[in-house]
């Protein structure tokens, strides 16, 4: 396990063979993939519901997130229960505190990007993982940064990862209030003046960040038609000393 001072870590979870099995299981469940892009044919899917897609901007969170998560949680538990348990145990050991899932919210699920939805131009917007604000937690959250994690199951041939910038939400909000940032282009220009850090993913490793930071999915270089990017995604908050994982 590799730990560094910037609160990013790589935790080994699966070997390459096990990642292939997860991928095969995912393809066997293809009829359950949720379409997430409007291209035809669709090339970006999830298996599972996610707060940032189904709660943050939804007009009817009950329908899009809370009701739907029952079906997806049961699929994820049935087919990927061992993997979820491995992740829970690894995080528990790493964080040195109890870690649990909850029936109330979505289990960590999968992002599935097929070749045409990947691009050499970054398409994902820089963001902070603050979606926990949109969920009704039963108790106040501990005064500690939430966590986010990504487990790479399959990556494009040229690799994949995450771009990040050392810019705080406070700095960005201030720039916004001062009128320095008011459109997405402007925002990108603002953040690109800060040094971009690239975090390369490794298949089978959980990339964990224990601090909320500005990031986006990085661009794919030398894209080929066979390329795909499959990851398991999750977040966690701590309540009364216990980490609760969700998506
Ligand atoms: O897929 C990734 O590398 C990270 C995605 C991400 O930032 C998110 O889902 O919040
Ligand atoms: Fe994110």
Image: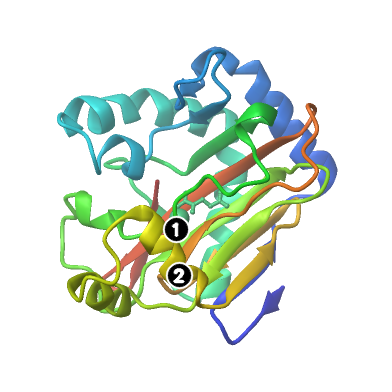
Q: Which residue is mark 1?
A: 126
Label number found at residue 18: none
The residue nearer to you, when weighing 239 against 223, is: 223
Categorize mark 2 by other alpha carbons within 10 Å: few (<14), some (14-19), many (20+): some
The residue nearer to you, when weighing 31 against 245, is: 31
Alpha carbon distance from label 2 to label 1: 9 Å
* In the rendered image, the vertical position of residue 236 relative to residue 52, given as above or below: below
Instruction: Please identify the quarter of the rendering in which residue 167 is found.
Output: bottom left
In the displayed structure, does residue 148 sit left or right of residue 242? right
Q: Position of residue 157 (x, y in %)?
A: 83, 43
* 2 and 1 marks in contact (CB < 8 Å): yes
* Secondary element at tag 1: loop
Report whether residue 100 is seen: yes
Q: Which residue is mark 2?
A: 191
Between marks 2 and 1 in the image, the one whose residue lies nearer the viewer: 2
* In the rendered image, the vertical position of residue 20 relative to residue 43, given as above or below: below
Q: Position of residue 181 (x, y in %)?
A: 30, 66
Categorize mark 1 by other alpha carbons within 10 Å: few (<14), some (14-19), many (20+): many
Residue found 51% across the figure and 67% down from its top: 92
* Secondary element at tag 2: helix
Residue found 38% across the figure and 39% down from its top: 50
* In the rendered image, the vertical position of residue 146 relative to residue 223, given as above or below: below
């Amino acid at each position: 396990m590799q730990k560094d001072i910037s609160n990013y870590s790589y935790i080994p979870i699966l070997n390459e063979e096990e990642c292939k099995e997860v991928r095969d299981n995912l393809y066997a469940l293809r009829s359950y993939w949720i379409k997430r892009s409007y291209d035809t044919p669709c090339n970006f899917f999830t298996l599972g519901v996610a707060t940032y897609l189904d709660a943050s901007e939804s007009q009817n969170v009950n329908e899009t997130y809370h009701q739907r998560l029952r079906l997806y949680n049961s699929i994820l538990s049935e087919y990927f229960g061992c993997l979820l348990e491995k992740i829970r145990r690894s995080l528990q050991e790493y964080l040195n505190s109890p870690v649990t899932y909850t029936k109330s919210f979505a289990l960590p699920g999968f992002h599935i990007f097929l070749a045409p939805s990947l691009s050499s131009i970054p398409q994902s917007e820089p963001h902070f993982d603050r979606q926990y604000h949109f969920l009704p937690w039963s108790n106040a959250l501990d005064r500690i940064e939430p966590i986010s994690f990504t487990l790479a199951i399959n990556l494009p041939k040229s690799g994949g990862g995450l771009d990040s910038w050392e810019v705080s939400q406070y700095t960005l909000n201030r720039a916004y209030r001062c009128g320095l940032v008011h459109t997405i282009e402007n925002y990108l220009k603002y953040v690109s003046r800060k040094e971009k850090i690239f975090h390369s993913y490794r298949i089978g490793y959980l990339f964990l960040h224990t601090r909320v930071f500005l990031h986006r999915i990085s661009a794919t270089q030398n894209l080929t038609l066979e390329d795909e990017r499959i990851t398991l995604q999750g977040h966690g908050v701590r309540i009364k000393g216990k980490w609760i994982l969700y998506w």
